[in-house]
Image (spheres, helix red, strand yellow):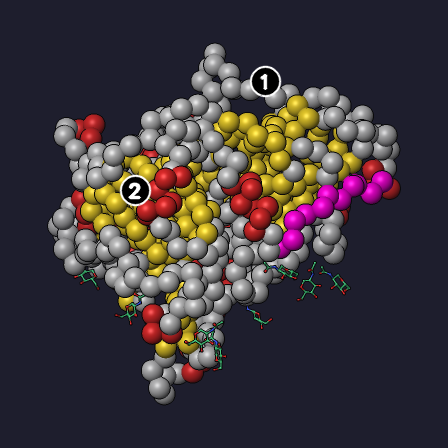
């Protein structure tokens, strides 16, 4: 993380900048530029831009990534936040630290893959491999010579910073014969708990301690899909090797000794996922907003757009001649084609978005049951939900069974939030509110909403700006599974959107 030394904004501002990158991605197609407004654009090819931000209240592991089309398939890396100088971890200092970036790889240009899906309306091709720190590992053809080795020594305790950077796939992660002690997630510490297996949705990070308490040898670290949807998926397994420095083979020919392979959960093992995600707590009592000003209920899920008769059928290759889509509260998010939402919000440029994103589903139905076909087609829109500065917000995120239920990793830019409850079926405010954890819920930036279930999050809207909340399965963003919170300025400079940096890339 040498590059980090050259940058300084809060990580929130960092997310703000990424959002600009995202929102303005399409601007490059537009040559028009008015005299009143100069439009911000992504970093131009061959150019550079330096992000400046101050880290506040976050320690642990985050990651940076491109947010334009599917570019993050390859443009990503770890962003590690260590304790302040002179301060230490809330656990014994690990001997070694190793980032473990789980990636996803196509034997094709990923941009061609998403373009093909956008053209045909079908689901994009599934990937051909997963990777650990860029390498697929021994279980794929011809890749064993480049398998990543993670060092450990007998009796030492190391920190693995596991990041799911895969584009479209929640992943299980495990290490043969070793227990993992979870100590942090999404750059917040957690109350330590021990597990054999992790599940990370794309976007999520999990920091774990691992101790060299096994016979010195070679053990596989492995990751493969948690596939909760009724849909095709990449069922391959990526591996790296946990290698004891004192392993008999370390000095000789290691290739001769086969590492021990762990048992991975079944692809559809939702029980393991539930047990894992319900183990998360904050290390101590935290200040969760007890009263709420905004009580929101958002459905999240897929849909199918019917095609008009005589429509070019090669554009309607989704199920039964439809096109895949996705939505929150029946609004399928469409990016503006010219100006970023943040710029339009700050400079009051009309015609870019509307502020009428619904607080509740427009139609109530049995979200997780057999949903009537008449409800499957959402409405496209560029809608935001306006929040007053400082408002205390609760959002119930409810998965739907439209097309297929699925575990959706929902990520909110600009905020960490408390996950105060999760469950299956339809959220019931009367009975489920009784089980809210308002004492020590985990603080995260991405929640894996259970398949055919729900999760409840709370946060205080104290970071003004335009903040996208989206599913971190990138194919779902492409289909519209997103919305935007428009958070007003408070009082004074410290509670207002910062002026954009002078050197922000323009179109
Ligand atoms: C997607 O998969 C199909 C079938 O294997 C193949 O013909 C097509 O070329 C693939 N698309 C891309 C963009 O790789
Ligand atoms: C590896 O190569 C063999 C022989 O070409 C092929 O049959 C097999 O499907 C390949 N396996 C993978 C995982 O690509
Ligand atoms: C993965 O899917 C392929 C094709 O459907 C199947 O042949 C193979 O057995 C599956 N592998 C695993 C590990 O489930
Ligand atoms: C999980 O997959 C197994 C093997 O394919 C299947 O037998 C089982 O019914 C599935 N379970 C669920 C809950 O879908
Ligand atoms: C496609 O049509 C068939 C036959 O009408 C039906 O059984 C199936 O459920 C449909 N699939 C979807 C995803 O709509
Ligand atoms: C941006 O695009 C929208 C939708 O096409 C249009 O209504 C609006 O006038 C455009 N605004 C500017 C400033 O070009
Ligand atoms: C779902 O509802 C449709 C229409 O009411 C019905 O045709 C279908 O059999 C139902 N499917 C299941 C699995 O109950
Ligand atoms: C979404 O809106 C469309 C258009 O009004 C409607 O046909 C559909 O039933 C709605 N679906 C839901 C889930 O509200």
Secondary structure at badge 2 equals: strand
Span shown in magenta? 257-267
Q: Nearer the viewer, mark 1 or mark 2?
A: 2
Q: Which label is found at residue 92? A: 1
- The residue at the point 49 percent across, 42 percent down is 204
Q: Is mark 2 within 8 Å of ligand 8?
A: no
Secondary structure at badge 1 equals: loop
Is 341 on the left-hand or right-hand side of 471? left
- Magenta region's main secondary structure? loop
Residue 47 can be seen, yes or no: no
Viewer-closest of 361 and 481: 361
Whether residue 335 is situated above or below residue 418 in the rendered picture: below
> Which residue is label 2 attached to?
394
- The residue at the point 43 percent across, 68 percent down is 370
Q: Residues within 10 Å of mark 2 (few under 14, many from 20)?
A: many
Label 1 to label 2, Cα distance in Å? 35 Å
């Amino acid at each position: 993380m040498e590059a980090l030394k050259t940058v300084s904004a809060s990580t929130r501002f960092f997310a703000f900048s990424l959002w600009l990158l995202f929102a303005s991605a399409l601007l490059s197609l537009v040559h028009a530029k008015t005299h009143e407004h100069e439009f911000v654009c992504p970093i131009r090819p061959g150019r550079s831009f330096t992000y400046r931000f101050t880290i506040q209240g976050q320690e642990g592991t985050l990651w940076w990534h491109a947010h334009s089309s599917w570019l993050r398939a390859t443009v990503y890396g770890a962003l590690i936040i260590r304790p302040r100088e002179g301060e230490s971890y809330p656990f014994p200092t690990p001997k070694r630290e190793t980032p473990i970036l789980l990636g996803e790889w196509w034997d094709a240009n990923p941009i061609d893959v998403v373009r093909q899906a956008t053209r045909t309306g079908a689901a994009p091709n599934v990937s051909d491999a997963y990777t650990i720190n860029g390498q697929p590992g021994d279980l794929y053809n011809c890749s064993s010579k480049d398998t990543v080795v993670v060092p450990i020594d007998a009796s030492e305790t190391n920190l693995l910073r596991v990041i799911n950077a895969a584009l479209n796939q929640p992943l299980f992660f495990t290490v043969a014969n070793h227990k993992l002690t979870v100590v942090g997630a999404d750059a917040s510490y957690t109350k330590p708990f021990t597990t054999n297996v992790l599940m990370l949705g794309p976007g999520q990070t999990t920091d774990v301690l691992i101790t060299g308490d096994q016979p010195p040898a070679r053990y596989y670290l492995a990751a493969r899909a948690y596939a909760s949807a009724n849909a095709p998926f990449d069922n391959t397994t990526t591996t790296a090797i946990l290698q004891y420095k004192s392993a008999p083979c370390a000095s000789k020919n290691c290739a001769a000794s086969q590492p021990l392979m762990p048992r991975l959960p079944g692809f559809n093992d939702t029980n393991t996922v539930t047990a894992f995600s319900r183990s998360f707590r904050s290390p101590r009592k935290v200040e969760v907003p007890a009263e709420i000003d905004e009580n929101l209920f958002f459905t999240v899920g897929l849909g199918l757009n019917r095609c008009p008769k005589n429509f070019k059928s090669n554009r309607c290759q989704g199920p039964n001649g439809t096109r895949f889509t996705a939505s929150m509260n029946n609004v399928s998010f469409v990016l503006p084609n010219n100006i970023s939402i943040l710029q339009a919000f700050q400079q009051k440029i009309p015609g870019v978005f509307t502020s009428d994103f619904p607080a509740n589903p427009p139609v109530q139905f049995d979200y997780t049951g057999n949903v009537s076909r008449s409800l499957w087609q959402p409405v496209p829109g560029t809608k935001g939900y306006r929040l007053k500065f400082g408002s205390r917000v609760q959002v119930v995120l409810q998965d739907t069974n439209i097309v297929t239920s699925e575990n959706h990793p929902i990520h909110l830019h600009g905020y960490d939030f408390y996950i105060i409850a999760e469950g299956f079926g339809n959220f019931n405010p009367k009975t489920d509110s009784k089980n809210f954890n308002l004492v020590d819920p985990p603080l995260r930036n991405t929640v894996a909403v259970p398949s055919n279930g729900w999760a409840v999050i709370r946060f205080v809207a104290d970071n003004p700006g335009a903040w996208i909340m989206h599913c971190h399965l990138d194919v779902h963003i492409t289909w519209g599974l997103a919305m935007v919170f428009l958070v007003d300025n408070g009082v004074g400079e410290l509670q207002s959107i910062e002026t954009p940096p002078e050197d922000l890339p323009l179109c």
